[in-house]
């Protein structure tokens, strides 16, 4: 099927999509004959396309007629998750460009802190993550920002489950000292050579009903004050990531917002 000046289209695909849209628009079971009338597709072709759509999970056949199947819902949910990841990556890219530093995103998943994404470059390379966040959250600005965003009881429970091993001479190994630091600096958290000598990391928590996480940048220790002077870039990035997660939650579960 070709429109003058337009792209070449596959007629059977266009007709199948027309049937899918017609079923969705009715909001109730629809018989094949009714769908043929609604779409202008011949009845034999309608039956053929409906069988294919049912077989592939796009539609479901009931005693009353055809209804939308599970697959479109799964595709929409996957699309929302992908869009959230893409929006967060764009935020990290902007943060990287604004501060000239490797940018990171981590979130709390089932009680564990997970690194979600990194944006870096040859001019601003990432820190060598030789110990994962599961074992080193207490020594990173990302991990400390997320721990600090938790309620007091959850902070303590997390630290009880994760021994505070020393990675450098600057690493906190006392839960009391770490919690005191987080109380003093709840919004902008710094790892000053606690994870790797010569490297500093600055993070801001991403806290809200849809996610507990943090965004951060890493720089040579000599540049940490430059980042702190422009920390509004981190704050803005954390807000935008939080909005991306909140938007996806609202789409997937409006009652939860």
Image (cartoon, helix red, strand yellow):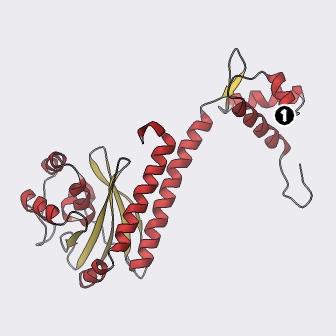
Q: Is residue 48 above or below residue 85?
A: above
Q: Is residue 81 above or below residue 201?
A: above
Q: How many marks?
A: 1
For residue 165, say whether it is visible: no
Give the quarter of the figure containing the C terminus.
top left
Q: Around disc 1, counting alpha carbons within 10 Å, would you say few (fewer than 14), some (14 to 19), or many (20 or more)?
A: some
Q: Quadrant of residue 226?
A: bottom left
Query: In the image as oriented, which residue stretches furthest toward the top?
Result: 63
Q: Secondary structure at mark 1?
A: helix
Q: Looking at the picture, how far across and down is residue 14, in whole percent?
A: 81, 43
Query: In the image as oriented, which residue stretches furthest toward the right?
Result: 4
Q: Quadrant of residue 24?
A: top right
Q: Is residue 143 above or below residue 15?
A: below
Instruction: Compare residues 86 and 235 and report the one nearer the observer.
Output: 235
In-image side of 27 versus 148 (left or right): right
In-image side of 110 versus 1 (left or right): left
Q: Is residue 38 above or below residue 194?
A: above
Question: Measuring 59% from the left and 31% from the top, which residue is drawn there?
Answer: 70
Q: Quadrant of residue 118?
A: bottom left
Q: Looking at the picture, how far across and down is residue 195, in whole percent?
A: 21, 69
Question: Measuring 42% from the left and 59% from the top, which residue is drawn there?
Answer: 241
In-image side of 95 versus 193 (left or right): right
For residue 206, say whether it is visible: yes
Question: Measuring 27% from the left and 71% from the top, which residue is drawn there?
Answer: 202
Q: Looking at the picture, how far across and down is residue 105, in whole percent?
A: 37, 61
Q: Which residue is mark 1?
A: 39
Q: Looking at the picture, how far across and down is residue 50, in whole percent?
A: 76, 28
């Amino acid at each position: 099927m070709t429109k003058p000046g337009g792209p070449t289209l596959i007629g059977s695909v266009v007709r199948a999509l027309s049937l899918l849209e017609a079923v969705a628009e009715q909001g109730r079971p629809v018989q094949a004959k009714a769908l043929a009338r609604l779409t202008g597709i011949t009845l034999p072709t309608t039956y053929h396309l409906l069988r294919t759509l049912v077989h592939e999970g796009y539609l479901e056949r009931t005693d009353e007629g055809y209804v939308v199947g599970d697959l479109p819902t799964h595709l929409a949910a996957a699309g929302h998750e992908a869009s959230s990841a893409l929006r967060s990556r764009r935020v990290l890219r902007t943060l990287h460009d604004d501060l000239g530093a490797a940018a990171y995103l981590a979130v709390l998943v089932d009680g564990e802190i997970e690194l979600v994404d990194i944006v870096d470059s040859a001019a601003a390379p990432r820190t060598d993550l030789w110990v994962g966040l599961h074992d080193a959250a207490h020594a990173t600005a990302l991990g400390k920002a997320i721990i600090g965003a938790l309620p007091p009881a959850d902070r303590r429970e997390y630290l009880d489950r994760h021994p505070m091993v020393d990675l450098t001479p600057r690493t906190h190994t006392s839960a009391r000292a770490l919690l005191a630091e987080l109380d003093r600096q709840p919004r902008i958290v710094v790892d000053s050579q606690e994870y790797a000598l010569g490297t500093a990391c600055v993070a801001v928590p991403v806290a809200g009903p849809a996610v507990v996480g943090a965004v951060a940048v890493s720089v040579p220790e000599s540049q940490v004050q430059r980042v702190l002077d422009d920390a509004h870039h981190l704050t803005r990035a954390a807000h935008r990531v939080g909005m991306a997660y909140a938007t996806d939650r609202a789409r997937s579960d409006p009652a939860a917002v």
